[in-house]
Amino acid sequence: MKFYPRATYRLQMHSRFNFAMLGEHIEYLYQLGISHLYLSPCLQAVPGSMHGYDVVDHSHINTELGGNYGIDRIAKLLADKNMSIILDIVPNHMAVRCPENPWWWDVLENGPSSQFARCFDVDWHTESDHSSNLILLPVLGDHYGIVLEAGELRIEHEQGRFALHYFENVFPMAPRSLSLILELAYKNSGIDELGYLAGALHVLPHASSRDIEKIHRRQRDKAVIFEMLNTMCKEVAGFDGALNAAVAEINQNYDLLDKIIGRQNYKLAYWKLSQYQVGYRRFFNINSLVGLCMEEDQAFCAAHKLAIELEKTGKIDGFRVDHPDGLFAPTSYFNRLRKACPDALIVAEKILEQNEPLNPEWPVSGTTGYDFLNLVNGLFVDKNGYEKLVQIWHEFIGERPDYHELVYKSKKLVIKTLLGSEISRLAADLTEICENHRRYRDFAQLQLYNALIEVATGLAVYRTYIRPETEKVAENEQKVINEAIALAKVRHPELGSYIFDFIAEILLLKLPGEKESLFIRRFQQFTGPVMAKSLEDTVFYIFNPLTSLNEVGGNPCDPVVTVKLFHAWCLNISKKWPLTMLTSSTHDTKRSEDVRARLNLLSEIPDRWAETAKKWQKMNAGFRVAGAPDANTEYLLYQTLTGAWPIEKERVAQYMEKAVREAKVHSNWSDPDQEFETALANFIDKLYASTEFIKSLEGFVDELIEPGQTNSLLQLTLKLTAPGFPDIYQGTEVWDNSLTDPDNRRPVDFAHNLALLKQLENKSCRDLMRELRQGLPKLFIIKKLLELRARVPAFNEPDSYRPIDVMGTRSDDLIAYMRGSSVIVLVPRLNLTRKDRWNGTRIVVPEGRWQNVFTGQPVSAGSNKIKDLLKDFPVAVIADMQQIEG
């Protein structure tokens, strides 16, 4: 790392915003004060990818972004301004897109004999069992036989190369299977060379062979045969035509085509089969993303060669590691990455549950900041008001859902309907283990399947990080596992305690063994997707008392954060993870920071909100059709409009369609309920057409816009001054009312933002607050505080955070702390309803030449009234210019 990050700026790179376009805006980001561009994945991805997490080739930079030349040019432009790059990397998975992914193409062509077979998380079985070594590919739109006989599968040939096509999907063909095509071509044409090559293909070593010598011979002979095929297609009269004729004949003969397809190293299947069975570990339930084995040297080295080279040559300063919870051995992975790049900044996309610490064994700089996001969000929620909001929600929907029960049921639903393949694999593994332990061998696989579901649903964190080879289980992980086991016993006593004790003994390393160790690793890889898909992508669209709390890593059941808790978190981070990332909006957040800031105000005015929501429900009752939308969906819609207004109807409709599918109550992604979704879309149309409703909505929201924007300025100040380094998600340097993706990935108007930045010159704080709705104060705070961060080393130093004593009756309404000895930060909370509260509240300012960074006003040492320090601007940062200027 060339220098500590002052602030990162997250950018979503794709063909419509490539390196050339980015280059046009570097000057703006430099003027804003950004030190590092935090780029979404930039390695070669699926053509047209809008996010880059579907990598197909690790060996070069995405050509749609500008390729290797493009990133080199950006790196040089940044270096000229003492800026750099943090690059998002994706070690957990790749896209299965063929032929763009050369590794996956080779595996499908050659099965276990592929040179990349060990790079992917595929269960390869015994050498003699061809059928169990087939990779199941659930990609067909209907059952295999129906698809085949509809003529949708066909072989194509070009110059000695063969591929199986299914619409836009292309699959390689096993070399031995091609002998059938060449034999038919020889029979029809009599060309001897065809007969010879058919025989040569037929005697190739089988793809299931584990013998190294046979594998090498297969690879050598295959290459020679394919070269001969290509040459003869060009040089031997009638050769190419005979092959084309044979392929055409086979495509018309479904029995023969089926025979050839049956000899491939994969098995094409109806996509719905993925609910029960897939031939590889997936990223969550996405069939198009296959898990990688980063524990294998070959996979790690090949996948990271370019990224490490970029860091070694100074073109980037570090990495954001995507989804480390999916890895077989996350700790070993981070150790290896750190060894390769000892000076790099490395942040892990780790979602921490409430009170869960970051793994102290990881040699990383910290997380990507969701823990901070939820901590700060909770500061601006009124405890009593939130409790009222829960009751209001219950009354509105006519039910009293229990949060923990919702989580439990959603986990079971997700496991059975989305992750059925993964849980079946674990149950099969556990069944094999039983056979090695006479005390436990009498459990049926179905019993083990049901017991595993219960244990996984009871886990209170995304995953544990037990390393069987160490023969140790951390105390906090023992606690998590024991609690899950105890909960499973209570919920399903009919399964008996004995089966859960057996699972506990394996997970807690009391039954050691090779298969047991593998099971532990796989179980830990499994529970992360269970939590993510059930909590983030299900419950957070159902549990709606206050939707600003339904955020990645959040706990809407217990969301309120006190000033004391905030200080404790900051002290810990300053000591252990001083270079962690601090975020407030990301490409994965459910709502932007500004939408959350406004919605949090509802906790301060619960009675007014209840009255308004009920009025809207009654006002719009005639717009519902056959009970759709239901009350909970309607309640979510009203909060969405309140938080994001003004917002286009099309964006709201798109968001609500996604919301009801994610909730999985009335619709879902695999089998959408068109009737319900149409009724919901019509309901939204009628809301936007209703003058009465829009007038009422705007009247209610208008009183929240500026207080919500003030809330946003307060949380922004915390992000820019708390321990760690701040990240600004693209476009959120001004007001941003984005919802979840794809809404939060809309193009940013950088020219407009630059024009606003230029308007800051010669404007006072009072001028800025008069133009609050333009977004100028947000830009102002960012620019001022990033200038300050550049001058104060303490922001990046450990143990540089100290809470300040606040004297007076409202001390718990003010977050006050020092960074080093030269910066004081004062951030009030819950400002909407608590007016005129600072008369008796004070802090003591140490000796020095202090100045308010925002107003420019001098601040005297000694006792200072909070009322005076906040009179011209809603937040205060005070700097000792004597220390800063030396």
Image: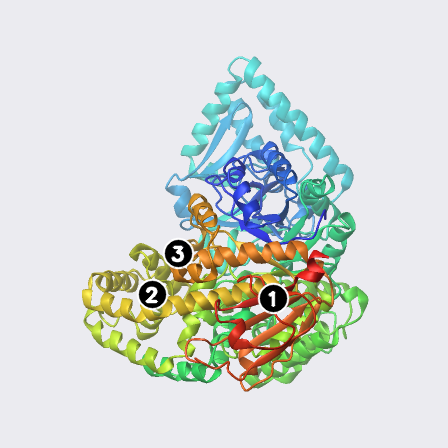
Residue 93 visible, this orientation:
yes
**Dot 3 corresponds to which residue?**
774
| Front: mark 3 or 1 | 1
Tell me which numbered mark, 3 or 2, is placed earlier along the sequence.
Answer: 2
Horizontal side, residue 829 vs residue 578: left or right: left
SS at circle 3: helix
In the image, is residue 551 above or below residue 106? below
**Dot 1 corresponds to which residue?**
878
As drawn, the label of residue 378 is none
**Crowdedness near tag 3: few (<14), some (14–19) or many (≥20) residues, C-alpha within 10 Å:** few
Q: Position of residue 619 (x, y in %)?
A: 21, 74
Residue nearer the viewer, 289 or 645: 645
- Type of amino acid under label 1: Ile
For the C terminus, give its image quadrant.
Answer: bottom right
- Type of amino acid under label 3: Gln
| Front: mark 1 or 2 | 1
Tell me which numbered mark, 1 or 2, is placed earlier along the sequence.
Answer: 2
Which residue appears farthest toward the right when viewing the image? Answer: 470
Q: At 48% from the left edge and 30% from the top edge, which residue is drawn? A: 156
**Dot 2 corresponds to which residue?**
641
Q: CA distance from mark 3 to mark 1?
A: 25 Å
Residue 828 visible, this orientation:
no
Q: At 60% from the left edge and 51% from the top edge, which residue is drawn? A: 93
Residue nearer the viewer, 625 or 208: 625
Q: CA distance from mark 1 to mark 2?
A: 37 Å
**Crowdedness near tag 1: few (<14), some (14–19) or many (≥20) residues, C-alpha within 10 Å:** many
